[in-house]
Amino acid sequence: MRRLEILDGGMFTTVQDLGRVSYQRFGVAVSGAMDPFALRAANRLAGNPDSAAALEITMTGPELRVSADAVLAVTGADMAPQLDGRPIRMWVSVAVSAGAVLSFAGLRSGMRAYVAIDGGIDVPVVLGSRSTSTRAALGGFEGRALRAGDVLPIGELRTHFAEALCHKPSPPLPPRRGVPRQSIPVYTHDHIVRVVLGPQDDAFTDAALQTFQTAVYTMTAQSDRIGCRFQGPALSHRESADIVSDGTTLGSIQVSGDGMPIVLMADRGTTGGYTKIATVISVDLARLAQAVPGDRARFQVVSLDDAHRLLRTEQEVLDAIGSAGPGRTAGVPDQVFDEDSGAPLAASAWTDLADAIDLTSRKERHDDAR
Amino acid sequence: MDVAPRILIAGDRALVVEYGRAIDEATNRRVRALTSALAARAVAGVVELVPTYASAMVHYDPTVTTPAALQEAILEADRHLDDVALPPSRLIEVPTVYGGRFGPDLDAVAVETGLSPREVIEIHHGRDYLVYMMGFMAGFPYLGGLSPRIAVPRLPSPRTKVPAGTVGIALEQTGIYPTDSPGGWRLIGWTPLRIFDATHDPPVLFEAGDRIRFVPMTEAEARQHAPA
């Protein structure tokens, strides 16, 4: 079995996937990746379905050894990833050999990085997900953040893409998938966070609604996977900050009695008793996941139609990276981009990839026949 | 006839169907009837339904459905709410050890309410409680309807660790901590029942719509009643 050996856990590294859905009515937190875009991109670059589990790394990187040949991808925050001490690029597929050590030199931008490995991190599925909920000590690796000495199993299901990329002595063309440069997010310290008003915007004064859309809020150090907390001009309620507890969703902006907005994130409680002035749109959750304490944010109201249109555009960006499809079907070769120009590679490269796939298939048939 | 619910927008992946803004059994029943009806209809694009006190959150996949289509499906289900047969409400007995090390706040609650500890216990277990909703943390039941005679405020500063199974009260609510966690409610008892277990599906002992009856017992009786 392929394994990922943790030599150093880093500050806070957890196993995450797209989250634990279908159990919110029992109070089970969704958890999952804080930056679902970066997670999905990493999975596609590693040849995985979007739902595969990967590592979420916070601020300082871990050190890991890969026990067997594998395809890795590092996305999200730039922590200067290195393979055996040599810098590697982010947002591309990287073939690594057995025994290679992945480490991180230091945080350069953003807050959370993702490491996907082909086959996915194969910790047990708990209530439909491999995500870690440290609050409930549930899922992931023993329900907690990783530390030195932990050994994570890697899924056995290998794609032709991954096998072709790990082909020895050297991988045939094309070398890897990549996210085109123009689609790679740039993490800054000033954020425009787009929101849709509601569900309790009517609980706020007109002045508060005005302030909410114009003032600059600063993210505080109390922010975590439960919520991004902001400091700035207080938002006044017409009557009360309290409501009869109702449901929360990823991006709900809760305002309690002190008038300060908290954007509820992956580990939020499923219900809450405070008014929610607005909800961050899905495509802007990544911005918040990558914000660091001290960053400034301004909330901008958009329409629900705009939010859905932006979501479709994001999906197109992900689809351009490559299929999120399941396992061992060869199918049509995925789009491959030149990592420097961001341009799609020439058609001749497809033939080479197809040959590589065919090679692996033959090898498999041979193995099966044994 | 009941008025149609208000449908509120909660971002680009969820709607809130609001039947009211107060805690009462009739409103809560409509919320649960709606989520049952929508679940039975298997409405395309609905990802998850979360009933709460007076509203339901409908999580949806915007690549599969639109808010307009969803709104129509919700209102259609609402028009036939009276025909919905809710799953039968179960009465679940919770063996409870009151006071002592299991309920460290019982004596203080008695002092604050001018009752004896025995009276607090009798008032607490003297009625059945509806599970209005679950939330806050995995497996936590929101039980409304605590007698105002034993309604006391939360602790000024929460305890850092409340053991799993502890029975607490705060204002006109009572509840059971499903797992070890910080908590600010006043602790009056404990049950050996495992009310949340992630290795089971569903992972909870009771669901919204069930009723809970606290049954006072000695520690030995309770442990026998609910082997760990």
Image: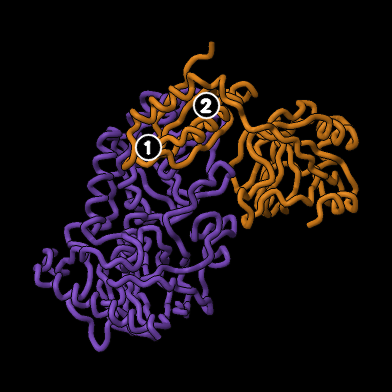
Chain identifier, purple in the render: A
**Marks 2,1: beta carbons within 8 A:** no
Letter of the chain that mark 1 sits on in the rendering: B
Residue A189 on image: x %, y % = 29, 54
Colour displayed for chain B in the image of the structure: orange
The structure residue drawn at horizontal position 22% and vertical position 47%, both measured from the top left corner, is A313
The structure residue drawn at horizontal position 79% and vertical position 48%, both measured from the top left corner, is B191
- Above or below, A342 against B98 in this view is below
Observer-nearest residue: A370 or A29? A370
| Colour setting | by chain
- Above or below, B45 against A166 in this view is above
Q: CA distance from mark 2 to mark 1?
A: 22 Å
Residue A247 on image: x %, y % = 51, 37
Observer-nearest residue: B156 or A140? A140
The structure residue drawn at horizontal position 53% and vertical position 14%, both measured from the top left corner, is B2
Residue A136 image-quadrant placement:
bottom right
**Label of residue A240 in the image:** 2
Residue A225 on image: x %, y % = 47, 54
